[in-house]
Amino acid sequence: MMILMIILFLLLLSNMMMMMSIILSKKSFMDREKCSPFECGFDPKTMSRIPFSLHFFLITIIFLIFDVEIALIFPIITLFKMVNMLTWIKTSFFFIFMLLIGLYHEWNQNMLNWTS
């Protein structure tokens, strides 16, 4: 019975503190900008169908591709202890070679030039 009363008291105390926090908080209409979502430099209060730079989109896709490839490199580290050295070197060089081919292709297509 005593534990039930303590739990009830703690629930009442926590609810009372949350209510006091809501009452005493200094939120106003001016904080609306601060609480609004911010996405890619767009103002969420204006028209949502404004065009954006396609180059920005391509840079984002390139970042995501290389980010996923970096995540795929991590298992190569654990593979080092499981296989012999020659197999590990072949696998690592093949993966890094594929990354470099992708980077060369993007460079050749002028996707890495911000001013083009």
Image (cartoon, rainbow, N blue to C red):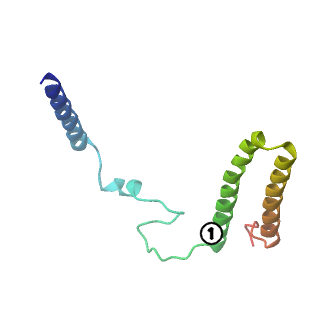
Q: Residue at x 87, y 47 (%)?
A: 86
Closest to the observer, 51 or 13? 13
Closest to the observer, 97 or 33? 97
Left or right placement of residue 81 versus residue 56 in this view: right
Residue type at mark 1 is Phe
Where is mark 1, residue-wise? 57
Q: Residue at x 69, y 64 (%)?
A: 62
Instruction: Please say if 94 is above or below 74.
Output: below
Instruction: Please say if 14 is above or below 33.
Output: above
Tell me the quarter of the image containing the C terminus: bottom right
Instruction: Please say if 29 is above or below 8.
Output: below
Q: Residue at x 16, y 34 (%)?
A: 12
Dividing the picture into quadrants, the one containing residue 22 is top left
Work out which residue is located at the far top of the displayed protein and give it.
2
Under circle 1, the secondary element is helix
Provide residue 39's location: percent of width, then percent of height.
50, 62
Q: How many marks?
A: 1
Left or right placement of residue 8 versus residue 69 in this view: left
Dividing the picture into quadrants, the one containing residue 80 is top right
Provide residue 108's location: percent of width, then percent of height.
83, 71
Tell me the quarter of the image containing the N terminus: top left
Work out which residue is located at the far right of the displayed protein and give it.
86
Instruction: Please say if 95 is above or below 82.
Output: below
Left or right placement of residue 71 versus residue 111 in this view: left
Closest to the observer, 26 or 54? 54
Q: Residue at x 79, y 73 (%)?
A: 109
Left or right placement of residue 80 versus residue 24 in this view: right
Provide residue 6's location: percent of width, then percent of height.
17, 25
